[in-house]
Image: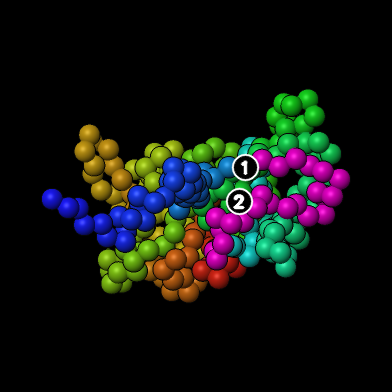
Amino acid sequence: MSLLMTPSHLGREGRGKEEEDEEEEEGFATMEEERAFPSDLSGFEFFMIMLSNSLKKLRMPDKFAKVLAGREPREVKLREAGSGRHSLCDVKVVLDADGHMYLGRGWEQFARAHDLRLGYILLFSFDGDAVLTVKVFDVSMCRRHYQRDDDASSGSSNDGSGSAETEVDEAPTSQFTVRLSGCHFLEKQQQYLNVPLEFHEAHGYAERSKVVLRMSGKSWPVTLKHTNRAGGKTRSSFRYGWHQFLVDNRLTVGDTCFFRALRGGEDHELKVQVRKLDGSFVD
């Protein structure tokens, strides 16, 4: 019985082992590249070394720029790892003609404030949206820790009280971030925002009936709704007043809200900053 050889069969038979090996290597490289560029950038880390030209602007790794291609923020919030969100520094993101990404305006201020010097190593962690957290290691190869100013800072509200307020001490539970989705924009009486359980427990939300959201010099009282969970635990969500906050600030699906706890007064207050879809910030 004869065997009919199609052109594709002939092609395979005629190829040498070297060509097959090359194809396997190309396929392996493609898989390696896919693994190297994750779709979720939350927790993406990289390090930079301070060079003589790093004070005015800091070039980001090309790989970081590549994975952000098409969704680069126009600015980021920069913070030293021990400072909390009360020390966020606005830094412009700049792209040159060759596609290289730099931290521009605002970077020099951050660098001088943290006394960054030649040879220092900076470990960056990206939150996947708009915040870069930095750990600083000096020439001793040990991490630097910065002393904080715990003095109260003055604040103002739309009622003109002008009471002093200080943000909560640095802790993972002193702030949380939420990217707004469809569930936050249901019918008016159904709109809600769940408070992360860790934040809820750290600030005693089970015993609170409301919070105050502060943004752009104004404040919005928001009622907390409590829901019983398995194991006897309680969960809280923003309910009445949340809709008005969304409307007054013209928030939309895809906007990212940064909530951080403030001290001061009997009501629990949260300072809110918003990163809009176009990359601009409102606070």
Q: Viewer-nearest of labels 2 and 1?
A: 2
Q: What residue appears at the point 45 percent right and 53 percent down from the top-left corner? A: 39
Q: Measuring from the top left, give residue 117's x and y in whole percent.
A: 83, 39
Q: Is residue 232 magenta?
A: no
Mark 1 Cα shell of 10 Å, populated few (<14), some (14-19), many (≥20): some
Q: On the image, which quarter does residue 223 sit in?
A: bottom left
Q: What residue appears at the point 70 percent right and 59 percent down from the top-left corner? A: 100
Q: Is residue 127 left or right of residue 228?
A: right
Q: Measuring from the top left, give residue 233's x and y in whole percent.
A: 27, 38
Q: Measuring from the top left, give residue 244's x and y in whole percent.
A: 41, 70
Residue 35, compared with residue 241, is above or below; it is: above
Q: On the image, which quarter does residue 17 sit in?
A: top left
Does residue 214 appear in this view? no
Please tell me which of labels 2 and 1 falls first in the chain: 1
Q: Hey, what amino acid is under mark 1?
A: Phe
Q: Measuring from the top left, give residue 71's x and y in whole percent.
A: 54, 64
Q: Given contact means CB atoms under 8 Å apart, are the residues at marks 2 and 1 in contact?
A: yes
Q: Hey, what amino acid is under mark 2?
A: Lys
Q: Mark 2 points at which residue?
A: 63
Q: Quadrant of the C terminus?
A: bottom right
Q: Is residue 29 left or right of residue 138?
A: left
Does residue 2 appear in this view? yes
Q: What residue appears at the point 22 percent right and 34 percent down from the top-left corner? A: 231
Q: Mark 1 points at which residue?
A: 46
Is residue 29 or residue 17 the one in the foreground? 17
Magenta part of the protein: which range? Answer: 47-71
Is residue 272 or residue 65 the one in the foreground? 65
Residue 72, compared with residue 154, is above or below; it is: below
